[in-house]
Amino acid sequence: MTAVVAGYVALHLAISAGQNLQAREHFRDGPARAAAFTALADRYASGDESARTEIAGAKQWFEENAPTGRARTSVAATAGLVEKGEASAVRERARTLVVEAGQDRAALDRDLGRSGRAALWFAVAAGVLAVPALWLRRRRRAASAEVVHAIGRFAARQPRWRRPLFLAAGSVGYTLFIGGFLAVAMVQRNGREMPPATQILMLPVGLAALGAGFLILRYTRPRSTRDAARALQADGRRPVLYLRSFADDHTAAQVDDGTALNIHSREEQLAAALGAFGPVIAVGRPGEPLPLLGAARFYLPLDDWKPTILRLMELSQLIVLRVGSGEGLRWEIERAVATQPGRKLLLLTPGRVADAVGSLDEQLPVPPRLEEVAADTTWISAAIAFDADWTPHVRAVEPAPGTAVPRGGPVHRAFRAVKAVFWEPSPARRTVGAMKGALASVGIRRRLVVLRSDSNMISTLGKGYLAIAALALPYRLLELVGVW
């Protein structure tokens, strides 16, 4: 990333150097033109009215070719005196024009030298930083080679142009989305200070940009995701294997109301939090036209999927399994208990606790005490981690504010009410909190796990600004070649 930033800055500085070179070439004849203009001013001051037209033409040349500086200002001021007929002041005003033109020319030379040297240094830095970056990339690919080999033939193959194309289109969506959001927020915050005409213009334009950006992102984001193999190669760490029933995908794909910037599903937030451990991979639903956002997908054949799942259980550093219906999930729990260490498995029980009690009591060496999970939730009710001897540690997902029975004194209840109004954690964030607590109880800790679940919303804002920064580069190139 540092190499990319250095290269990006080098390109901007190179464009600036090119613009400075163009400005210097345009003003190459500046001192000579200044001397000629001074002679015209002397002629006019001596009473030669025919010099008036030539002064106007010389002024136009300076406006088109001279940099913003003293010479251009002096020419404009002198031409203004000519138009007013103040012949006595024209000669005095143009007296220092040749010296000023030389100073402007020297300033252009200095600007060109500075921008050229800075571009060169940043280009060298980008090249130097690219060497360890390529080495790390090769090392990540080598570290993930075994698991990539296990799923590589099941990853959906896409043309090489597909992801870059939709990433570029998505950058336009992020730009519109963030720009529209900022415009609407500005009207809401500073509406009283704005003229009514500005409000009338900014609010519908901002809403239109916000909606257009959302629709573009809704179309481009699923088409620009990495498949599981490429996600593993890009990361290099051992993966987190996410197992669940395909029937539960529709609830995991929901986007919960939160901030206006939240366009990410529950599974995306869950995968972002689990990214503290490693890249999250999951089996995709057979026949789905596009992968759901969240865990990176790969697709297994319906008649021969068990050997691959067993192999991935061995290669993964963590197995996260959402309990549900189906013989496939029952088999996966049985195999995980029979073949893997207890601390490697993390179970997520469904929103209705009763749906998981019977099956887990039969399949786990030590039945978890799910009766302690008091309240059902809309998505996941509890997270269960295990010690090495398969002793379960249950952490219930906190119920949504307003659904729990108030406890404590009046001050405590009032505090909880205010907290519910101003800060209501989403189901995904509450689930991640339970996961963190369950894993911590068996000695597995990672930093910023809960905050990472909200990182998608932060990344939306960041991607919007990055898209604007990326679009600034072609804009400046168009300026350099004179198209814009």
Image (tube, rainbow, N blue to C red):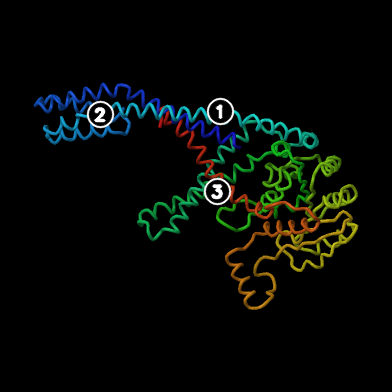
- As rendered, which of 464 and 58 lies closer to the eye? 58
Left or right of 425 on screen, residue 278: right
The picture places residue 57, in percent across and down from the top left corner, at 22, 26
- Per the model, the C-alpha gap separating discs 1 and 2 is 41 Å
Left or right of 50 on screen, residue 310: right
Residue pointed to by mark 1: 124
The picture places residue 43, in percent across and down from the top left corner, at 13, 24
Where residue 234 sits, quadrant-wise, is top right
Where residue 433 sits, quadrant-wise, is bottom right
The picture places residue 89, in percent across and down from the top left corner, at 14, 34
Q: Quadrant of the N terminus?
A: top right
Q: In the image, what residue occupies the spot 23% across and 33% down?
A: 74
Reading the chain from its start, which is encountered first: label 2 or label 3? 2
Amino acid type, callout 2: Gln
Reading the chain from its start, which is encountered first: label 1 or label 3? 1
- As rendered, which of 218 and 93 lies closer to the eye? 93
Q: Quadrant of the C terminus?
A: top left
Residue pointed to by mark 3: 461
- Per the model, the C-alpha gap separating discs 2 and 3 is 45 Å
Q: Are marks 1 and 3 in contact (CB under 8 Å)?
A: no
Where residue 219 sits, quadrant-wise, is top right
Report helix, strand or loop for mark 3: helix
Report helix, strand or loop for mark 1: helix
Q: In the image, what residue occupies the spot 39% across and 61% down?
A: 192
Residue pointed to by mark 2: 60
Residue 196 bears which disc, if any? none
Q: Residues within 10 Å of mark 2 (few under 14, many from 20)?
A: some
Q: Residues within 10 Å of mark 1 (few under 14, many from 20)?
A: some
